[in-house]
Image: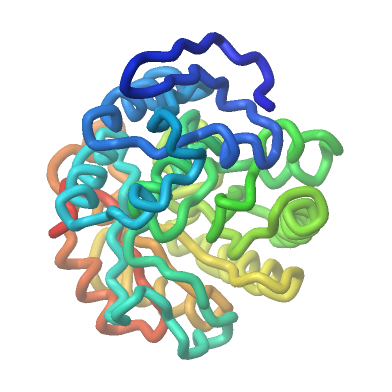
Amino acid sequence: IAKGTAGCFQGRRRRCALLTGSLDRGGACALMGRINVATFPVALAASLLFPRIALAFQPPLAGLHSPHLAARRPPRILQRASMGLVAGTTVSAGADSAENGVELKPAVGGKPITFGHRLCVAPMVGASDLAFRVATRRWGADCAWTEMFYSDKIVSDAGYMEQVLESSPEDRPLVVQVCGNDPTMMAAAAAKIERFCQDDLFGLDAIEINLGCPQKRAMDGHFGSYLLDKRDWDLVCDMVSAMDQAVDVPILCKIRLLQTRDQTLEFALRLQDAGCSLLTVHGRQRGSQRHGRKGPANLEEVAFLKTQLRIPVICNGNIRCAQD
């Protein structure tokens, strides 16, 4: 069931299987049991410190999907899960006002979002693999993102998607994140992602353009938050439009705050008009080597942006508890 099972042991009160993150498609769902409050920090720490390894705990004799544990998701547990996940800034709270987090009205120029998105597990490089995504879903996440994939590798390398992306029936709703700076390449990558997920995996629900990565590799490759400068706005909108026309699933965008509120709003409106169906906003600016990104995220600016857009908005950054 699992490739390279590292070891397992059986105790009086629970069984523990030390699994690699590289599971056969569907294997994570079959092997990973429910994680209780006491064991969740251990599993989370293992997933964060060793991205390809996850500790999965399951009650003895209760079956792989214990009904009483499946239904037990009180607010106290959700809050603890949210507070624990913030170590990697991975939890985003949806700003949409719908009761169940589903945006039913059509986006302007884009496709409607039909999956819940109030509590989302944001992409985290080296950690957002299948085992981690499934674990967070079982602790109340409405949907989860993959880590960032490179559009040029998706198009040029025939085996790239099989190497980096695994899924299971439980791994839905699923958003695949991709980066790049060429509309034609991004559209081709989106089409290949959709085809791969539909034919070889268990489907997907959206594809997101990474416009928020502030790392040096993003600067060197001219992608992520280094496409937020106004000179690149036309290019970004062309990417959104090309990808929206190339696939049947919605196209999402993740950005950071720009230097002023007016700039952020203008850019967000252009993305909306270009076909973006949902916008995730990290409440910090890109920063620089001289001016870092430390300090709390400006969630008020994200809330303002929500009032000005018709598409759903997800607030990312500085999420420390369920109330945030």
> Compared with residue 264, is residue 75 higher up or lower down, i.e. above or below?
above
> Compared with residue 184, is residue 131 higher up or lower down, i.e. above or below?
above
Q: Residue at x 53, y 41 (%)?
A: 147
State the residue in front, 14 or 172: 14
Q: Residue at x 34, y 65 (%)?
A: 314
Q: Residue 282, image x and y in percent?
A: 31, 55
Q: Residue at x 31, y 76 (%)?
A: 96
Please indicate whether residue 228 sits to the left or right of residue 45 in the image: right
Give the image quarter of residue 322: bottom left
* Quarter occupied by the C terminus: bottom left
Residue at the far right in the pictured view: 158
> Compared with residue 310, is residue 136 higher up or lower down, i.e. above or below?
above
Q: Residue 200, image x and y in percent?
A: 80, 49
Give the image quarter of residue 302: bottom left
State the residue in front, 203 or 28: 28
Q: Residue 65, image x and y in percent?
A: 48, 45
Please indicate whether residue 111 sits to the left or right of residue 305 in the image: right
Examine the rendering and report whether any part of residue 195 can be seen: yes
State the residue in front, 50 or 278: 50
